[in-house]
Image (tube, rainbow, N blue to C red):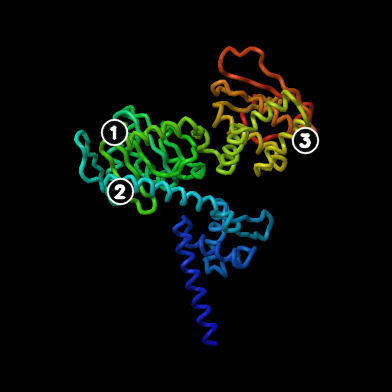
């Protein structure tokens, strides 16, 4: 009997430790308890989760909805409501990767800072550069002051933690914008749908990139490197070769990143899929589709569907309304374009204003999708291209079922 009590005590202690660890990953205490209960006991009704996780009944359903929004659980659409946990490897894989990259980048920064710190006797003609290490409170105040005093530009590569930090500087950002300062932020795709993103001033240029650390460069002569694990910052009041490399790195990342301003108010799940699909088209599917169109070796529709679904995007399981919204969002990201549906003439139009990039792959994708569901189409491309704008139209054989009013229509 004594052995069982010790075992239960150890189990409770382990669970308390795990709850604390999950809180460090961004979950609330209720969310952590509910998630641990589901991975330990399997799919459960909301009332069962409330019982085993020791949650107030009034809090259990909002808690489960938050877990679903964070892609940590799935809630059934039928009653009684059943909730199932996403396996930990799938649920936290991206977060772990993000933290590993962040630690790796911070170690590189610390190594460079350490070399500067340990530099001893300097040869004639050398110049000493200084930086300041600030605790979280002083770092926040310093960032606000530098933003307020900026003259021309603020460029930053941020992770989710950095986005939250800079969103708290909104009054300073507004003042800088009022003074004509150009602000550009590069964020990881995990930030799409983040509530802090929608709170930023609309004048800020936003893009989605592949890096995830916290570097803020102000007027090309001040730089702040922030450790998101503890909030401490290194502030460089003048930039040497070390700092200039970060400026070049930012410009390179900005050029390769994807526009995201249009997606701030978009449903997070739709925005995430739109970004994935746009990247897929940009990274090779576009060329593959065009090659098939010129030299068909197999059924084009089958090739397109297989290429898309190999990436994990289940296009054939997506309804028409959702697919239109995904493609419309993707066109806004990569082509400054959009998708329109003319219900009167049964025509779908794809428009682009994106530096001469062809939208033909998107037209072929839609044609393949409709062919699969038994609706043939004919692709018609504008013959006169006076500007960089491109328009391609799909004339469908059959009308499309009534769509929600989320896509522009004539």
Q: Label 1: which residue? A: 221
Q: CA distance from mark 3 to mark 2?
A: 60 Å
Q: CA distance from mark 1 to mark 3?
A: 56 Å
Residue 332, position as x, y percentages in the image = 56, 30
If you read the primary sequence from the N terminus, does the residue marked by circle 2 or circle 1 appear first?
Answer: 2
Front label number (2 vs 1) = 2
Residue at 58% in and 30% down = 331
Decide if residue 51 is on the left or right side of residue 242. Answer: right
Q: Secondary structure at mark 1?
A: loop
Q: Label 3: which residue? A: 372
Q: Label 2: which residue? A: 114
Q: Is residue 82 above or below residue 335?
A: below
Residue at 34% in and 36% down = 217
Q: Which quadrant of the figure has residue 351?
A: top right
Residue 231, position as x, y percentages in the image = 34, 51
Q: CA distance from mark 2 to mark 1?
A: 21 Å
Q: Which quadrant of the figure has residue 132?
A: top left
Query: Is mark 2 in CB contact (under 8 Å) with mark 1?
Result: no
If you read the primary sequence from the N terminus, does the residue marked by circle 1 or circle 3 appear first?
Answer: 1
Q: Secondary structure at mark 3?
A: helix
Which is nearer the eye, 410 or 265?
A: 265
Front label number (3 vs 2) = 2
């Amino acid at each position: 009997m004594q052995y069982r009590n010790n075992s239960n005590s150890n189990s409770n202690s382990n669970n308390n430790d795990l709850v604390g660890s999950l809180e460090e990953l961004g979950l609330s205490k209720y969310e952590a308890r509910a998630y641990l209960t589901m991975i330990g006991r399997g799919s459960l009704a909301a009332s069962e989760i409330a019982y085993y996780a020791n949650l107030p009944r009034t809090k259990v359903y909002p808690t489960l909805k938050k877990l679903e929004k964070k892609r940590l659980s799935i809630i059934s659409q039928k009653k009684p409501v059943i909730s199932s946990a996403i396996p930990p490897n799938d649920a936290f894989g991206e977060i772990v990767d993000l933290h590993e990259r962040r630690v790796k980048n911070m170690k590189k920064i610390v190594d460079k800072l350490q070399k500067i710190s340990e530099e001893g006797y300097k040869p004639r003609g050398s110049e000493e550069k200084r930086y300041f290490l600030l605790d979280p409170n002083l770092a926040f105040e310093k960032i606000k002051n530098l933003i307020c005093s900026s003259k021309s530009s603020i460029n930053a590569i941020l992770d989710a933690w950095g986005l939250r930090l800079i969103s708290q500087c909104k009054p300073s950002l507004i003042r800088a914008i009022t003074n004509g300062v150009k602000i550009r932020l590069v964020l990881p795709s995990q930030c799409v749908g983040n509530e802090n993103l929608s709170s930023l001033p609309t004048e800020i240029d936003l893009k989605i990139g592949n890096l995830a650390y916290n570097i803020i460069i102000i007027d090309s002569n001040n730089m702040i490197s922030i450790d998101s694990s503890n909030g401490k910052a290194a502030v460089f009041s003048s930039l040497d070769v070390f700092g200039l490399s970060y400026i070049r790195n930012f410009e390179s990342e900005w050029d390769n990143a994807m526009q995201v301003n249009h997606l701030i108010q978009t449903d997070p799940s739709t925005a995430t899929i739109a970004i994935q699909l746009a990247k897929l088209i940009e990274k090779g599917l576009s060329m593959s589709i065009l090659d098939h169109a010129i030299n068909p070796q197999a059924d084009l529709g089958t090739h397109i569907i297989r290429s898309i679904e190999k990436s994990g995007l289940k296009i054939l399981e997506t309804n028409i309304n959702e697919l239109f919204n995904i493609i419309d969002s993707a066109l806004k990201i990569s082509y400054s374009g959009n998708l329109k549906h003319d219900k009167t003439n049964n025509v779908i139009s794809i428009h682009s204003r994106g530096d001469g990039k062809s939208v033909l792959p998107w037209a072929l994708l839609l044609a393949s999708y409709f062919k699969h569901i038994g609706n043939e189409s004919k692709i018609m491309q504008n013959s006169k291209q006076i500007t960089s704008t491109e328009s391609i139209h799909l004339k469908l054989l059959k009308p499309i079922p009534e769509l929600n009013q989320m896509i522009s229509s004539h």
